[in-house]
Image: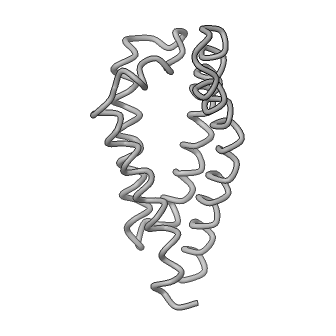
Amino acid sequence: MHDDESGRPAVALALLLGAAGLTHFVRPRFFDAMIPSRLPGKPRHWTYASGVAELGVATAVAVPRTRRLGGLLAASLFVAVLPANVKMAVDYHRSGKPLPMRIGSALRLPAQLPLIAWALRVRADAGHRR
């Protein structure tokens, strides 16, 4: 595979993570509501911290030299945010949000699996190009 082609999934993943990270700062209230109440401190701190984490991981994935580590960090990040996605799905169901919002929040849960696989594929591809 040509280097430009093999790097496309990594660049796309970096863009997705970067956009998600920026959204934590542009629309923090959306993410604040996903923070489990059992976590210490204010939800906004967790929202900003997770946004910084996504931006950092996006950078690691985007840079070929750190891409292998970035892929592993991205997969770990997708696993780490799963409890927030579960909380959002449960909250949306209990609150009687409109059906499309409840369906969307429920679909986020199985969507984590292909994201994890994508990140691990980026990691594996980066390892093969050394």
The answer to which image quadrant residue 93 occupies is top right
Task: State whether residue 34 is above or below residue 5.
Answer: above
Residue 5 in the image: above or below residue 69: below
Q: Quadrant of residue 16?
A: bottom left
Give the camera-side residue of 19 and 95: 95
Residue placed at 64% from the left, 66% from the top? Answer: 121
Residue 123: x and y in percent read 58, 66
Instruction: Look at the image and tell me whether residue 53 can be seen.
Output: yes
Residue in the image at 42% along x and 51% along y: 57
Pick the front one: 118 or 26? 26
Residue shown at the point (34%, 21%) measured from the top left: 45
The residue positioned farthest toward the left in the image shown: 26
Q: Is 41 left or right of 86, judged from the image as shown?
A: left
Q: Would residue 130 be visible to someone looking at this image?
A: no
Q: Left or right of 75: which side holds 49?
A: left
Q: Tell me if residue 47 comes above or below residue 11 in the rendering.
A: above
Residue 113: image location, x then y, percent? 70, 48
What is the x, y in percent for residue 109?
Answer: 68, 35
Q: Residue furthest bottom?
A: 2
- Closer-to-camera residue (20/77): 20
Q: Position of residue 3 (x, y in %)?
A: 48, 87
